Amino acid sequence: MSFAIGMVVALGCMLGGFTAAGGHMFVLWQPYEFIIIGGSGLGTFIVANPLATIKDTGRAILEAIKGKGPKARDYLDVLGLLYTLMRELRGNGRNALEEQIDNPAESEIFKRFPLVLGNKEMTAFICDYVRLIMIGNARTHEIEALMDEEIETLKRDKLKPYQAIQAVSDGLPALGIVAAVLGIIKAMGALDQSPEILGELIGAALVGTFAGIFMSYGVAGPLASKIKVTREKRCRLYVIIKQTLLAFMNGAMPLIALEHGRKTISAYDRPSIDEVEGETMGGGKDAEPMKKAA
């Protein structure tokens, strides 16, 4: 929603200011200039990126425009699932939890948290490290190093669309100059025409420079930044999982371990302790208030 509002404000002020200054809107309508710039940008994007990144970029653009970063419900689902798994592991041991971890799609525990179960990468991440905890001989610092490496790999993969769009954004001003040069070449072939016609051709060529710069700094650049912010927020969910499980491995009670994870959430989005308590207590009759656990 914010992306759409921002674009309306940017375009409205730019075009409104141009019109108020005495400009004519029809002069800016040069479809062939936009085809040259947009087509060249798209072509270079396809050349520079593998098919998997191209597909993921489409998903990332939709996520950014729709603002599909983690919401309060996502954080509470992650914390609720982790609490349930830790409580089961602490109270019933390995045998009770092994079947749930080996087949999360059929697990009654995971089914209670559909937002997590719907994310296959995150579900696999949780299951892999809970399985390592269940083995019992894993050292905390080794698990932490492994988690850091995997999170860094996930983040690097998730930010490839940002890097791809940013590369296109950096190249659009130059492509605008290319379009302008082609327009000037066309104008040079019409030097024998009247000044009015020649002026229109030169004006059309200059629109290419304007379009390239605006598409770079007014559209592609902000979109790339929005993708980066959205994807980084989604990657923070893995840090929550990491801190929670590491605290549990170090001997913390499940609710105390959740507090380690909760504190890694941005202050703008962080659920309160009461909300986390309510979520965990709703997830199982054996949940205890945070104060008693402390």
Image (cartoon, helix red, strand yellow):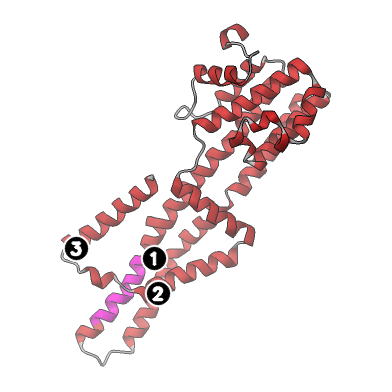
Report if the CB atoms under discs 1 and 2 are less than 8 Å apart: yes
User: Residue 177 in magenta?
Assistant: no
Name the amino acid type tagged 2. Ala
Q: Name the element at disc 2.
A: helix
Residue 232's image quarter?
Answer: top right
Residue 156 visible here: yes
Above or below 193: residue 15:
above
Name the amino acid type tagged 3. Thr
Q: Name the element at disc 1.
A: helix
**Residue at (33% x, 76% y) in the render:** 205
Residue 18 pos. (x, y %): 22, 62
- The label number, if any, that marks residue 186 in the structure image: none
**Residue at (50% x, 55% y) in the render:** 166
Q: Main secondary structure of the magenta part?
A: helix
For the C terminus, the image quarter is top right
For the N terminus, the image quarter is top left
Above or below 282: residue 197:
below
Q: Would residue 190 appear left or right of 132 to someone viewing this image? A: left
Q: Callout 2 environment at 10 Å: few (<14), some (14 to 19), or many (20+)?
A: many
- The residue labelled by disc 2 is 179
Q: Callout 1 environment at 10 Å: few (<14), some (14 to 19), or many (20+)?
A: many
Please name which of the two marks, 3 or 2, marks the residue nearer to the observer.
Answer: 3
- The residue labelled by disc 1 is 212
Name the amino acid type tagged 1. Gly
Q: Nearer the viewer, residue 168 or 292?
A: 292
Q: Callout 3 environment at 10 Å: few (<14), some (14 to 19), or many (20+)?
A: few
Q: Nearer the viewer, residue 57 or 98?
A: 98
